[in-house]
Image: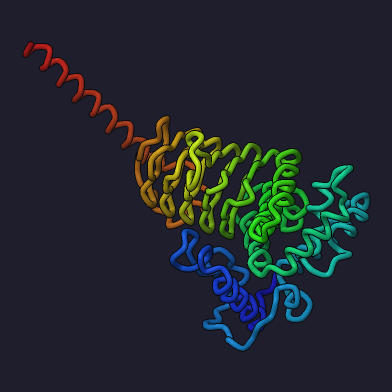
Amino acid sequence: MACLSDDTWFALSQMRTLTLQENPETFGPNSAMGEYRLEKVFPVYAVGVSEPDPNLIVSVANTASTVGDPIWDAVKLEAKLEAEKEPILSSFLYASILTHDCLERALSFVLSNRLQNPTLLATQLMDIFSDVIMHDRCIQCSIRLDLQACKDRDPSCLSYCSALLYLKGYHSLQTHRVAHALWKQGRKVLALALQSRVSEVFGVDIHPAAQIGEGILLDHATGVVIGETAVIGNRVSLMQGVTLGGTGKETGDRHPKIGQGALIGASATILGNIKIGEGAMVGAGSLVMKDVPPHSMVTGIPAKVIGYVDDQDPSLTMKHDASKEFFKQVAISCNEARSNGAVASERDDGAT
């Protein structure tokens, strides 16, 4: 797949700048989400261009039809190839992808058909999704970064096309982005209706007020619960069954804040207004109720620090286990601690 032209890189960079200007409290460099370089998580868009032309303002929707959108181009090409391989899917692939002129409209079509019910029609949902996504530069950028995250980090993801069509983690996340935009517009009832449908259809429950960064992977996604005041930074990966919840009936800011680049293992439960540091890794099945230092590895019930990770962003490597040598050292340390404790206990018994 070819790299973007300079004009397209300018357009994406300008879009990113405008997004930061329009939402500094959420996406600014001093925010919980923070700013990051696209090159690190979106290599297909890294073409070595330095500063964008400040006078060039082009939306992603226009970019797709003027100077090229490599993600959308890849999706269309993959859909054409799949239609040739599986003629029985040709009508489905044409209606879902090939009939549309940009990624935004194709995604709107896919989501509306996945979430429709007898009283919430696909045509109504299509209008809602299209209206929000086509007018929100932040979402336009996020849908591509999230799609790239699926392709890069999920070994079972065959293509951009398959992620767009079939991965419910991706679908849940993009529906949340629309619901979050509606929530900020004051259309809270509609936002909650979308949250309810996502919970029913995909088994994923994300409150519309939750703030979620870009380049996010919800791998498998089943059983993921994200509370109202939770904040998730950029480039985070969450496995199935992860809960970012509160500790009771308290109100206000009561949910976890996940630093960028963190990797949260399957069925991990993180409760309360606590911070998971940047680049931290939470082991599968852990219960976390205290702050986690940056780039540390925690596991257990309750979770404790068992070491530190070498990767700047473990969410990108998706390595859920440490090296064999690391665990060997942990085992030796535990045995030594137990032996020292036993010796001390014997001494105390002798002294009495």
Which residue is rendered at x = 62% and y = 62% of the image?
145
Q: Quadrant of the N terminus?
A: bottom right
In percent of width and height, residue 87 lies at 93, 53
Residue farthest bottom in this picture: 55
Which residue is rendered at x = 79% and y = 68% of the image?
102
Whether residue 289 is visible: yes
In percent of width and height, residue 203 lies at 69, 38
Q: Is residue 197 left or right of residue 15?
A: right
Which residue is rendered at x = 12% and y = 12% of the image?
349
Q: Nearer the viewer, residue 8 or 115?
A: 115
In percent of width and height, residue 338 lies at 25, 24
Q: Nearer the viewer, residue 337 or 141?
A: 141
Whether residue 319 is visible: no
Instruction: Give the vertical position of 23 relative to 244 (above or below).
Output: below
Instruction: Give the vertical position of 242 relative to 110 (above or below).
Output: above
Q: Is residue 218 left or right of residue 124?
A: left
**How was the colour assigned to the protein in this rendering?**
rainbow
* Quadrant housing residue 149: bottom right
Instruction: Give the vertical position of 226 relative to 333 (above or below).
Output: below
In percent of width and height, residue 128 lies at 79, 59
Q: Quadrant of the C terminus?
A: top left
